[in-house]
Image: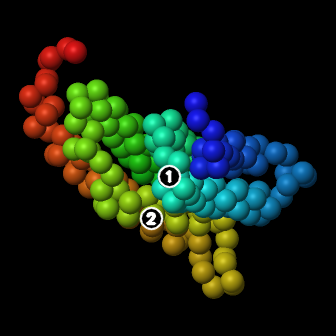
Amino acid sequence: MPFNIPIFLTWLRVALIPLVVGVYYLPTPWLPVADRNLAATLVFIVAAITDWFDGFLARRWQQTSAFGAFLDPVADKLMVAGALIVLTQLGRVNGAIAFIIIGREITISALREWMAQIGASKSVAVHSLGKIKTTAQMVAIPLLLYHDMLFGALDTQALGEYLIWVAGVLTVWSMFYYLRKAWPLIKEKAGMLP
């Protein structure tokens, strides 16, 4: 397993996930609700920044690796799923949206793994639609975690709900895009064992 700064940042993102979830399980006298929201928001933002920064550094320093390519999307999916589950439990995200987003991530991950096994991973390479969906999620989730007025005028819950619904629509759209791209190979290989 290679170890470098980009992979360290990815591991750091994995390590931050339990903190986003864990702050909501602390007793209220230790950390009031508003402070929990702020702490979870800041930790999630730091994790999201490492998501961009690790890829940037890996490309810039030519430190890309198969392990990094595996670990990075796993960390992303764990981060989003953990936050969505907490937000659903707190009543800030509709359970159907959380299911759609998490279900899509599982489906597309399985599709990419299968396509890689048959040597057709380029058919389901990351598309700009998926990147827009990810951006909408990464903005919506901290707004929903914060769950308060920002600068006395911005209702983060309302804006976060709007953006998570946008992310939900883009999630379904991008899932169908990837499935449509893979469909000819799925039909061709259906029922064939390696």
Kind of element beneath mark 2:
helix
Q: Residue at x 61, y 56 (%)?
A: 50
Snapshot quadrant of residue 109: top left
The N terminus, quarter of image? top right
105 horizontally vs 13: left or right: left
23 horizontally vs 53: left or right: right
Kind of element beneath mark 1:
loop
Q: Amino acid at mark 2?
A: Ala
Badge 1 is on which residue? 62
Q: CA distance from mark 1 to mark 2?
A: 28 Å
x, y (%) of residue 154? 60, 81
At label 1, counting other C-alpha atoms closer than 10 Å, the crowd grade (few under 14, some 14-19, many 20 or more) is few
Q: Residue at x 48, y 41 (%)?
A: 65
Eyeballing the image, is 146 above or below 40?
below
Residue 147 shows in the view: yes
Q: Amino acid at mark 1?
A: Gln
